[in-house]
Image (tube, coloured by chain):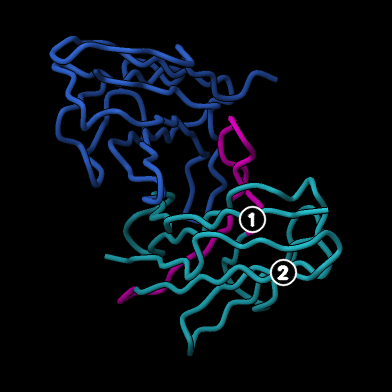
Chain colours: A cyan, B blue
């Protein structure tokens, strides 16, 4: 079984500031890692994912994340945020061997970008 | 491009009532999922299906039932609604594969049980 912990439930930042949303995972097997975003009153959309290869993954809307196996982390970053990035962000993990695309989600981080 | 469509968007139930949340997708995805989202808890998997006629329990299946008679449809049934089932429900689908596939989500059903 695997689990995901998002270390911050709320992150307020000012427009054009950098942001990092932290995610740690726990698993006894190799995993795939994901970040999804949920805008108000909408379903989740995939931001980016790590399957293999380069540990720095680039996604949509200028976001990127770095897989750190030794620290079991997959933190999400953006160098300069916009008001439109205000949303809830979910880190998720799936087991490479047994669970296919079934995801275990973290509790979510509400990013609020202020003018 | 309809994607994943959920109905209804909102519903209020009385304790003990039953209802079916509808989910349909037009992407010919074999895999479909039902998640519930509670504040501060993330999303929890209720049931999933890897193809027509095949369903399996997720993390929180108690109080729910599903069926998968076609590739397109994956309804979720609540038989005896309880206040603990007040939540936002999301249906999702994905291509079959070796893992790591992108999930496509519907816009959700907000359910209140009073």
The quadrant holding residue A106 is bottom left
Which residue is at the front of the view, A10 or A53? A10
Quadrant where the N terminus of chain B is found in the figure: top right
Which residue is at the front of the view, A32 or A109? A109
Quadrant where the C terminus of chain B is found in the figure: top left
CB atoms of marks 2 and 1 within 8 Å: yes
Please give the residue where the numbered disc 2 appears in the rendered image.
A19
The vertical placement of B3 against A113, above or below, is above
Q: Position of residue A102 (x, y in %)?
A: 39, 49
Residue at (21% x, 26% y) in the render: B83
Q: Is residue A46 a member of the stretch shown in magenta?
A: yes
Residue at (41% x, 33% y) in the render: B32
Q: Position of residue B92 (x, y in %)?
A: 47, 33
Magenta stretch: helix, strand or loop mostly: strand
Apparent side of residue A94 relative to residue A12 in the rendered image (left or right): left
The vertical placement of A94 against B81, above or below, is below
Residue at (53% x, 28% y) in the render: B106
* Residue found at the very far front of the displayed protein: A115
The vertical placement of A34 against B1, above or below, is below
Q: Is residue A31 a member of the stretch shown in magenta?
A: yes
* Residue found at the very far bottom of the displayed protein: A70
Say few, some or many: other residues with alpha carbon within 10 Å of mark 1 (under 14 / 14 to 19 / 20 or more).
Answer: many
Q: Position of residue A69 (x, y in %)?
A: 50, 84
Apparent side of residue A90 relative to residue B78 in the rendered image (left or right): right
- Point out the stretch of residues depicted in magenta: A27-48
The quadrant holding residue B46 is top left
Please give the residue where the numbered disc 1 appears in the rendered image.
A111
Callouts 2 and 1 on one subunit: yes
């Amino acid at each position: 079984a695997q689990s995901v912990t998002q270390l911050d439930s709320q992150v307020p930042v000012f427009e054009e500031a950098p942001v990092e949303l932290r995610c740690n995972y726990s698993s006894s097997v190799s995993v795939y890692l994901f970040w999804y975003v949920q805008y108000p009153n909408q379903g989740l959309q995939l931001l980016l994912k790590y399957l293999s290869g380069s540990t720095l993954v680039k996604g949509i809307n200028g976001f990127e994340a770095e897989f750190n196996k030794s620290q079991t982390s997959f933190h999400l970053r953006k160098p300069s945020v916009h008001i439109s990035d205000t949303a809830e962000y979910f880190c998720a993990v799936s087991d490479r061997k047994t669970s296919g695309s079934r995801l275990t989600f973290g509790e979510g981080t509400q990013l609020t970008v202020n003018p | 491009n309809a994607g994943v469509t959920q109905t209804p968007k909102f519903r209020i139930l009385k304790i003990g009532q039953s209802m079916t949340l509808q989910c349909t997708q037009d992407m010919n995805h074999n895999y479909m999922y039902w998640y519930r989202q509670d504040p501060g808890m993330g999303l929890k998997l209720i049931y999933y299906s890897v193809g027509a006629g095949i369903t399996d329990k997720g993390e929180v299946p108690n109080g729910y039932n599903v069926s998968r008679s076609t590739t397109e449809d994956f309804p979720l049934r609540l038989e005896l609604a309880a206040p603990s089932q007040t939540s936002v429900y999301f249906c999702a689908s994905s291509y079959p594969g070796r893992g790591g596939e992108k999930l496509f989500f519907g816009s959700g059903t907000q359910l209140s049980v009073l």
